[in-house]
Image: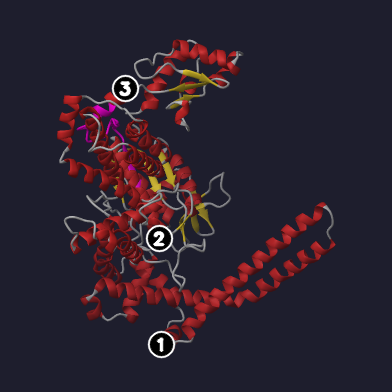
């Protein structure tokens, strides 16, 4: 049920005789910000008056005169300079709410679409543990897949794993030089992770060591710029002083950034060289970064030893990430990683050459695009292929296998230029008929406003993040004071289950509550609170509905029979507001699809939970004045519980019957 669409249809019919742009003007219907002005408002009279050269209130009156909404609304009201306010009839609200009883889709009409929507999301490098940086792509992509599939689209999810790149060169090098085959065989996931970290830390040491050789000259130059800017401030007067101070501040920030980067590099070097074991490793593996690249190249060339090691390690690496996905309740239709497309890359380059799109430049094969300064490189001088080549091969495969109308890439904002180039080449590659969307997103920040990392500077592991959320959820939801009120008592197993559902839900909900393009600060205390804009608040609202139904000893079928017997009538403003919210799920989902923004559904669930809270405060269910009022209120309780449960499920978040 999409009330704005229904109202737009009526407005189009009214506007048809007044303008050729009836569709555009009818689309200007919005929910009102204040219930005093009705439920919906249309602001089309003012822009239309300019087209017609008439007074906007007169235009609004003409629209209302031809508007056929008496079956839905009270007589429309014209306010201010020409706003048309619409208030739905209580009888219409009651009857529509009644029709939702027994409807598992909560009034959402499925869409019929032959072409599929492919969603590419998560896509970690499988040779290392998932970290906080993977949470956004994973939960945003999963939420989009669930919501679009529920809307009726044929959704295909694909986890484009990084299972063929430098990360495996790192593991192979680590295994050959630091690994014990027996130890790795006995505990492969933990040992491979340890080997990866050893080699990665040594590579970072080599980078830091090299960077320190060039810092002095950079710092001297940055200090010179600061001194020059400082002198300019001393000499500046009047309007030029503000500009001079701004230049000085910019120069000082750059100097501090360079000094901070140097300190970080010095700390990395110090941490290695001050430890005898690490210092010995660094000394013996002074060319480790180049050696890792060679191990990677050997794998790509089909070297028998490296290929055998890759085949041995890959299943264990996948087991590690699948364990995290199981905990997040995230599934994929396909997990076609980079290795799947390796044999297709040469053909992609040849096709680009044959189409006149690619040519050699300094030994590399590049695609030059007029709208970009730098070309898209599809094959390096040494013959190695790049992400762009793999992405084009992936695009070709998806076109042939999945019949897509849309392909969504849920990847962070830093990759924007890559996707702009990819989409530009795809158009020239004969793939212009598909809607390609980079569903970009911002960064998870710590409390200091910087990307969330451990004290050592590495990104926080995703599993430790989940553990922390579950532990905190247990403290909040299962504290001794709350547990004392439960009858029957809540045993340990139930407490652990609730903590897991609430804790994991808190991480997901907090991420999805922000518009995907925004950065957000990670605050575990706020995420698991029972009040505020949290999943726990919505989950608790659901649990309250179940408690009322339990006390009333009524299932939904029983409530439906009560409504049939006694009728349904909205007798309190809080009932009416809740009923109106329960009709808006489809609006939220359609808006979510337009912007690929799950926060639209989050906002809807929070608004519904808040409307339910007001209903609870003002409308007693079990002590209702008449059987009709009780039937009405029990129906609203049933539908609220089912709507909140469904909405959370579409975000990949569970509910619990009591908390």
**Was residue 629 drawn as part of the magenta stretch in this picture?**
no
Q: Secondary structure at mark 1?
A: helix
Image quarter of residue 638: top left
Q: Residue at x 30, y 55 (%)?
A: 502
Q: Which residue is mark 1?
A: 277
Q: Residue at x 46, y 78 (%)?
A: 287
Cα distance, mark 2 to mark 3?
A: 42 Å
Q: Is 425 or 62 nearer to us in this picture?
A: 62
Rendered image coloring scheme? secondary structure
Mark 1 and mark 2 residues within 8 Å of each other at the beta carbon: no
Q: Position of residue 190 (x, y in %)?
A: 28, 73
Q: Is 373 or 71 nearer to us in this picture?
A: 71
Q: Tell me if I can see residue 146 in this picture.
A: yes
Q: Nearer the viewer, mark 1 or mark 2?
A: 2
Among the two numbered marks 1 and 3 on one chain, the one whose residue lies closer to the N terminus: 3
- Magenta stretch, main secondary structure class: loop
Q: Which residue is mark 3?
A: 92
Q: With respect to residue 402, does 15 lie above or below?
A: above
Mark 2 and mark 3 residues within 8 Å of each other at the beta carbon: no
Among the two numbered marks 2 and 3 on one chain, the one whose residue lies closer to the N terminus: 3
Q: Secondary structure at mark 2?
A: helix
Mark 1 and mark 3 residues within 8 Å of each other at the beta carbon: no
Q: Which residue is mark 2?
A: 525
Q: Position of residue 436 (x, y in %)?
A: 41, 41
Magenta range is 96-122
Q: Secondary structure at mark 3?
A: helix
Q: Quadrant of the C terminus?
A: bottom left
């Amino acid at each position: 049920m999409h009330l704005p669409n229904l109202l737009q249809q009526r407005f189009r019919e009214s506007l048809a005789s007044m303008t050729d742009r009836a569709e555009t003007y009818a689309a200007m219907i919005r929910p009102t910000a204040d219930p005093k002005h009705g439920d919906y408002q249309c602001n089309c009279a003012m822009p239309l008056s300019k087209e017609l050269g008439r007074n906007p209130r007169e235009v609004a009156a003409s629209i209302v005169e031809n508007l056929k909404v008496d079956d839905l609304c009270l007589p429309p009201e014209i306010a201010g300079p020409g706003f048309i306010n619409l208030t739905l009839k209580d009888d219409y609200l009651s009857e529509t709410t009644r029709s939702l009883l027994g409807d598992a889709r909560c009034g959402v009409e499925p869409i019929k679409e032959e072409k599929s929507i492919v969603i590419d999301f998560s896509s970690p490098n499988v040779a290392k543990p998932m970290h906080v940086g993977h949470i956004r792509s994973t939960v945003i992509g999963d939420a989009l897949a669930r919501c679009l599939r529920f809307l009726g689209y044929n959704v295909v999810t694909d986890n484009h794993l990084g299972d063929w790149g430098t990360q495996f060169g790192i593991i192979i090098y680590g295994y050959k030089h630091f690994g014990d085959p027996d130890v790795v065989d006995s505990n492969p996931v933990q040992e491979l992770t340890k080997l990866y970290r050893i080699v990665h830390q040594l590579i970072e040491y080599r980078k830091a060591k090299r960077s320190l050789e060039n810092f002095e000259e950079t710092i001297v130059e940055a200090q010179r710029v600061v001194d020059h800017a400082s002198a300019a401030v001393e000499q500046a007067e009047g309007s030029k002083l503000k500009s001079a101070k701004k230049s000085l501040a910019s120069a000082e920030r750059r100097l501090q950034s360079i000094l901070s980067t140097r300190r970080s590099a010095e700390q990395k070097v110090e941490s290695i060289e001050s430890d005898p074991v690490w210092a010995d490793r660094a000394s013996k593996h002074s060319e480790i970064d180049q050696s890792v690249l060679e191990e990677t190249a050997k794998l790509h060339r089909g070297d028998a030893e490296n290929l055998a090691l890759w085949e041995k390690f890959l299943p264990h690496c996948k087991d590690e990430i699948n364990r995290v996905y199981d905990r997040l309740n995230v599934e994929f239709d396909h997990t076609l990683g980079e290795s799947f497309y390796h044999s297709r890359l040469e053909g992609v380059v040849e096709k680009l050459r044959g189409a006149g799109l690619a040519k050699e430049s300094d030994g590399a094969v590049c695609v030059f695009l007029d709208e970009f300064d730098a070309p898209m490189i599809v094959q390096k001088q040494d013959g190695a292929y790049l992400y762009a080549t793999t992405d084009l091969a992936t695009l070709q495969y998806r076109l042939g296998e999945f019949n897509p109308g849309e392909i969504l890439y849920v990847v962070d904002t830093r990759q924007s230029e890559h996707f702009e180039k990819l989409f530009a080449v795809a158009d020239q590659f004969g793939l212009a008929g598909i809607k390609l969307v980079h569903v970009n997103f911002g960064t998870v920040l710590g409390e200091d406003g910087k990307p969330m990392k451990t004290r050592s500077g590495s990104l926080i592991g995703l599993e430790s993040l989940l553990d922390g959320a579950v532990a905190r959820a247990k403290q909040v939801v299962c504290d001794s004071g709350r547990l004392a009120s439960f009858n029957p008592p809540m045993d340990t197993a139930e407490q652990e289950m609730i903590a897991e559902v609430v804790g994991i839900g808190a991480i997901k909900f907090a991420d999805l509550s922000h518009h995907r393009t925004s950065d957000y600060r990670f605050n575990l205390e706020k995420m698991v609170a029972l009040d505020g804009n949290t999943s726990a608040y919505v989950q608790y609202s659901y649990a309250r509905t179940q408690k009322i139904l339990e006390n009333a000893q009524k299932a939904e079928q029983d409530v439906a029979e009560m409504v049939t017997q006694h009728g349904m009538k909205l007798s309190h403003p809080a009932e009416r507001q809740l009923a109106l919210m329960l009709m808006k799920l489809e609006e939220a989902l359609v808006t979510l699809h337009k912007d690929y923004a799950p926060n639209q559904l989050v906002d809807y669930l929070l608004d519904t939970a808040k409307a339910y809270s007001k209903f609870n405060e003002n409308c007693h269910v079990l002590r209702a004045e008449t059987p009709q009022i009780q039937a009405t209120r029990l129906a609203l309780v049933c539908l609220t519980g089912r709507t909140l449960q469904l909405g959370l499920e579409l975000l990949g978040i569970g509910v619990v019957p009591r908390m």
